[in-house]
Image: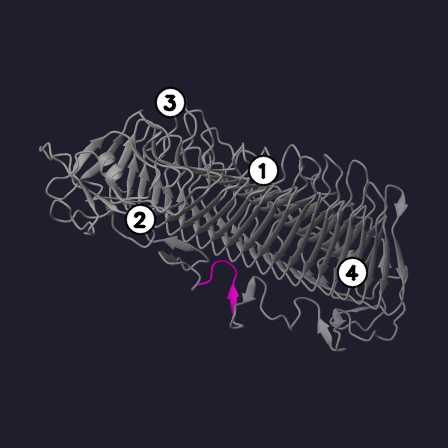
Amino acid sequence: MRAIVVATLLTLGCGAGDESETAVAPPAQCAPGEWAREDGLCVAAGLPPDMPCAPAEAPNDSGVCIPAGVPSDGCGEGFVHDGDRGCEPILPPEPCEPGWLAVPGETRCREVTPCAQGTWGDIPVETDTEYVDASYAGMDSDGSALKPWTTIQAGIDAASPGAIVAIAAGSYVGDVLVAGNPVRLWGVCPALVEIVGTLAESAAITVLGGASGTEVHALAVRGDRIGVLVSDALDVELERLRVHDSVHRGIDVEDTFGPAQVTLRASLVEQNHESGVYLLGGEVSVETSVVRNTQPTAQGLGGRGLEVETDPITGSSSALLVRGSLVDDNSDIAMFVEGSEATIETSVVRATRSNLLGAPGWGLSIVDSPMTGAPSSLLLRGSVLNDHHEVSLLVESSEATLEASVVRATQPTAQGLGGFGVVTRSDEMTGAPSNLVMRASLVEDSLDYGVMVDGSAATVESSVIRRTRSGARSMGRGLNTQVGSMGSRSTLVMSASLVEENQQFGVFVSGADATIDATIVRGTQGDANGLFGRGVNVEVDLATGAPSTLLMRSSLIEQNHEAGVFAGAAQVTVETSIVRATAPNAVGRGGFGAIAQALLVTGAPATLTLRASLIEQSHEGAVWIVGSLATLEACVLRDTAPSPAFGAGDGVMVGAHVAPASATINQTRIHQSALAAVAAWGGDIAIENSALTCQLIDLNRETLFGTAGNFEDLGGNRCGCPDPAQSCKSVSTGLEPPTPLEPLSE
């Protein structure tokens, strides 16, 4: 432990002692701890008074400042604000029974559609309708209501283009083909009308060329292969269907024979195998529907709710729209999008399970095409991803935009792996990056990473990342930005956001570039060993040597542990910000406001610039420069206390560990440090136009590893207590030198 200063040192501070003095010079244009705004007004260090909104707030369209996260009026139809920066879907408390469903906004489970009275229920009556009733015993069927066909295919074959084929109650065994002419298949209701596919065709219902405009309403479908297959047909409408228990895919839309486009509305797709809805080179809109409980194949593969892929033969991409829907309790991946476009609005995607082969249980997987390299794109708006395994949202070599959405409670796999909220990464083979934009959204209760940016670009605006906890990797990082596996560089732009109550690191930047504006990072806790808990950690990537940079402006970093801002062999600039109330870690070390630390193996230095910023209520040291370079301009450092394990309590500490260390301090006020205002442990410090008030020692000059500390007086410096009215004293106390924190984390 660094020695506690004895009483005799009380005579050395604030003008006492006789080793050296600095001259008192006329004050600068602004007082120490103030900076000159463009209009010439002197402004106190810290958050600028003319900020349009406080940190972690942003103006809405009316100019009213609203907190980060989903605004109180920002939840979509079918959702309610939780009062704590997020939205909750309105759904029944328990899962619905087979054949019943509820979509966001409904509090009770219901049938897909009720069954009306009469043989033909509420099927529209038109002059050219063809009627089908399997119970008709006559041998003289003509398609009339009195003499209906007994098979659905007979009604289709007899129907004129666009005519209704009205289907009475019954189980109709046999595959149905619609080709050449469109028809409108219309059952009484899914509870009474069921088409049971065999292996005669590819699907229980197949819609092919010449049948664009076909509609299927109010019936149930299951089959020994696919439930509904559409290819070479546009404007196909599937409405109020129950597609269930198919041995293969529930609904298959593909461009194998030609362009395909389908709208699935007010339907239930459940307990199918491999994929609930499969899209290959076509377009599908899923509206107010439920896709759930998709099972793996007999070989243990798949079980995905929706699967969207590029056609491997034509290279055609797909387009998916999901609106007002529930994707629930599927296997492997809830929604897989490869080389295609997906828009998800006011929907819930939740509770994805691992399949029989141990596939993870991801929420959304948005990846590039391995054949063409074409990226995917995702727009997730007003939606909730909840209770997935390993990763809730993966974006690989693709683009994703999250708006007013919630990513919540990501779980690890059965093997204890993952628990990541949002992962955006480059392609592991090509290095092609991803791009993530997150606005007014919430990521909470993840493991290891709330948001990870790996070899990619991310923009985070007015969003909240909180309560990330350590998982199998013993991390707990709120936002992690790092170099990609192929050396691709990551960039992060973060504004008006809140990162809080995470573990190990609030924001972690490794081999990447970051800009943070008007953001709060607070309440970061230590890891299982009681180490770290840092607010913003910026460091060189040890594996590749890729450097990191951070520009942080008008932000608040508070109530973190060990270090508020840590620069490890990185270039960090902090402007008009506050770093407050940094506590020691669980073993009693640190509590530094800001650290610039050289790489302990190579001596590669960090560069730290603090400009017009306030650092207060730190422990051990407000600013600690270890084998690195620092510049402090128009800053205030105050109320620095000792740490339990090391003591000290210096305003600025400059130590020549591993490499030379230097600091330039200009127009800065250092107030009420427990020990020294500025301590040079073998480092070089130039100080100018600064005020050092109410410390035990003004300037502490010590030798470290044979190198003497050195102060260069550039003039205009004043010391004293309570007012800086005296010259400053430089003394040597022979105290034990400080030691660096734990080595860089990776």
Find numbered disc 1 in the image and state the secondary structure of the residue it sits on. Answer: loop
Q: Which colour scheme is used?
A: one colour
Q: Quadrant of residue 252?
A: top left
Q: For the magenta stretch, what is the residue range?
A: 65-72
Image depth: mark 1 or mark 4 in front:
4
User: Residue at (76%, 44%) from the top-left corner?
Assistant: 569
Query: x, y percentage for residue 415?
Result: 48, 28
Image depth: mark 3 or mark 4 in front:
3
Position above or below: 500 against 175:
below
- Image quarter (top left, top right, bottom left or bottom right) of the C terminus: top right
- Kindly report the distance in space between the C-alpha atoms of the residues bearing marks 2 and 1: 52 Å
Mark toward the start of the polypeptide (3 vs 4):
3
Q: Is the magenta stretch mostly helix, strand or loop?
A: loop
Q: Does the magenta stretch include residue 482?
A: no
Is residue 272 shown to the viewer in this render?
A: yes
- Image quarter (top left, top right, bottom left or bottom right) of the N terminus: top right
Query: x, y percentage for residue 490?
Result: 67, 45
Mark toward the start of the polypeptide (2 vs 3):
2
Q: Nearer the viewer, residue 633 or 509?
A: 509
Identify the mark at residue 1; answer none if there is no mark. none
Q: Does the magenta stretch include residue 70?
A: yes
Would you name the residue on which mark 3 appears? 298
Query: x, y percentage for residue 519?
Result: 60, 59
Q: Residues within 10 Å of mark 4 (few under 14, many from 20)?
A: many
Would you name the residue on which mark 2 appears? 266
Would you name the residue on which mark 1 appears? 529
